Image (cartoon, coloured by chain):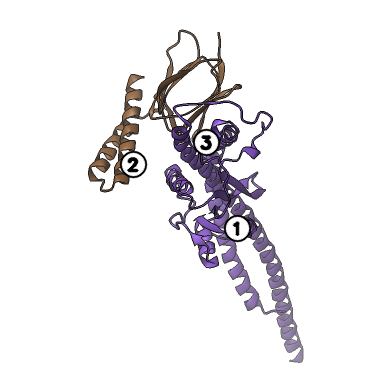
Chain colours: A purple, B brown
Amino acid sequence: MASMKEINLRIKSITGTRQITKAMELVAISKLSKARERTERCRPFYNELYQALCDISTTSTAKDSPYCQAREAKKSCIIVIAGDRGLAGGYNNNLFKLFEELSADKNVCVLPIGKRSVDYCTRKGYEIISSEYSSVEDIDVGDCFEIAGSLCEMFSECTFDELYVVYTNFASMLTQDPGTLKILPLDASISANTSDNHRFMLVEPGAEAVFNSIVPDSVAGLIWGTVCESFTSELAARRTAMESATSNADDIIADLQLKYNKARKSSITQQITEIVSGAGAE
Amino acid sequence: MSTFHLKIVSPDGVFFDGEAKQLSIRSIDGEIAVLKGHIPFLTAVAVGECRLYVNDGEVPKTAACCGGMLNVSDEEVLLAPTTFEWADDIDIERAEAAMSRAEALLQSASTDADRKIAKRKLERANLRIKVAKKA
C-alpha cells in the first residue's frame, strides 16, 4: 500500500485539478446563458432567411444571377468554425472530422474562425484566406458582414466556386451536432417547394442590383447564425465535459481519502502494537 | 379590413409577426409600400424609415431599417433587414454619439473603403436620429 504521504500528495494534486475544472464549468455556465439567448434571438432570422433564399433561388429571375448558377466546382471555400480553447470534450475533434470528410475530394481554401481552427488549418497546411478571426467569442455582426462581403467578391471573381460552412448545431444543452451548410451558389434543390419550379417573381429594380445587394447581406446573416450556434455549442460542450471531469475528480478524491484513512488506521494499529509489546517486555 | 401576414426578423430577434395593413419601406429603388395581394416581389432594402400600419386610422409605427431584403410571397411578407429598431427603442444620445464618431471617422479616413464605411455609419446614425425625433 502506498504511504500516507504519497496518498496525501495525490489528494492535493487532484483537489487542485478539480478546482480548475469546477471553475471552467462555472465560467462556461455563466457565458452559456448569454450565448444561448443570443442564439435564440438570431434563430428565427436565420431560419426565415435560409428558407427565403431557397425559395428565391427557384424563381426564374434568379437564374440570371451568378450567385445562383452552379458552376463546375474547381475550388471550394470552407468556413470552419471551431472553438477558441480545448477542454470541451469532443467538440473540436468532431468538427474537424466532418471538415476532413467534406474536404477529402475537393480542392479547398479555408477561412478558419476560432483559435483552434486557425491552429488546425495552419498545421495541416491548408490554403488560408485570412487568419484574422482567431476568436469566436469576439466576433460580432460587423465582422460577419466583412467576411461575407469579401467572400462574395471572391466568389463573383471566380476565386472559388462553392462556399460551405462547417459549424456545430446547438440542439440542446446535452447534444450538439456538427453540420455543414452550403451557402453559395444558392441551391434550388434544397428548397421545400420544388413543385412550382421557375415560378415568377418580380424583382425590382433588376435582378443584378438586387442580388448584388441582398446576397452579401444574407450570407452575412447565415454566417452570423452559424457562429452563434457554434459558440453556444462550444460552451455547452465544455460545461458537460467539465461537469463530468469534476465529478470524476470527486470520485477519485473519495477513493483516495478512503485509502488514506486505511493507511492511517493500520499505521496507528501498528504503533499501538509496538508500544504494547514494548510495555509487555519490561 | 384587408390585412396580410407580415414577419419582421433581424439578427437581433423577431420584431413583428402578425397581421398588418400596410408596410412602407425604402428600397434601393426608392420608397415602396406593400398592401394585401401584392404579387410575389423581391427587393433589397436601403437605409430608410419603415412605417407599419396595423389598424385603420392609427398612427403608423415607425422604425429605422437598414439593409437586408424584402420578400413578398403568396403566403406572407418577410422583411429581413440587417438592422431594425422601433422608433421608441432608439436611444437618441447614443445615436448622436454614433453620429459624431462617424463624422470623426469620415474626417480621418484615408482609404476609399474606410470612407465608404464611415459614410454608411453616418447615414445610419442620421436616420436613427431622424426617426427617433419624429416619434
| Rendered location of residue A110, percent (x, y) | 52, 57
- Front position in the image: B84 or A165: A165
Q: Real-space Cα distance between discs 1 and 2? A: 35 Å
Q: Looking at the image, is B30 positioned above or below residue A119? A: above
Number of numbered discs: 3
Chain ID of residue with mark 2? B
Reading the image, the residue beneath label 3 is: A64
Mark linked to residue A106:
1
Q: Real-space Cα distance between discs 1 and 3? A: 27 Å
Q: Looking at the image, is A239 positioned above or below residue B11? A: below
| Rendered location of residue A24, percent (x, y) | 55, 56
Q: Residues within 10 Å of mark 3 (few under 14, many from 20)?
A: few
Q: Is residue A45 visible?
A: no
The amino acid at mark 3 is Asp
B59 relative position to A26: left or right:
left
Chain ID of residue with mark 3? A
The amino acid at mark 1 is Lys
Residue at the (43%, 44%) spot, across then down: A149
Reading the image, the residue beneath label 2 is: B117
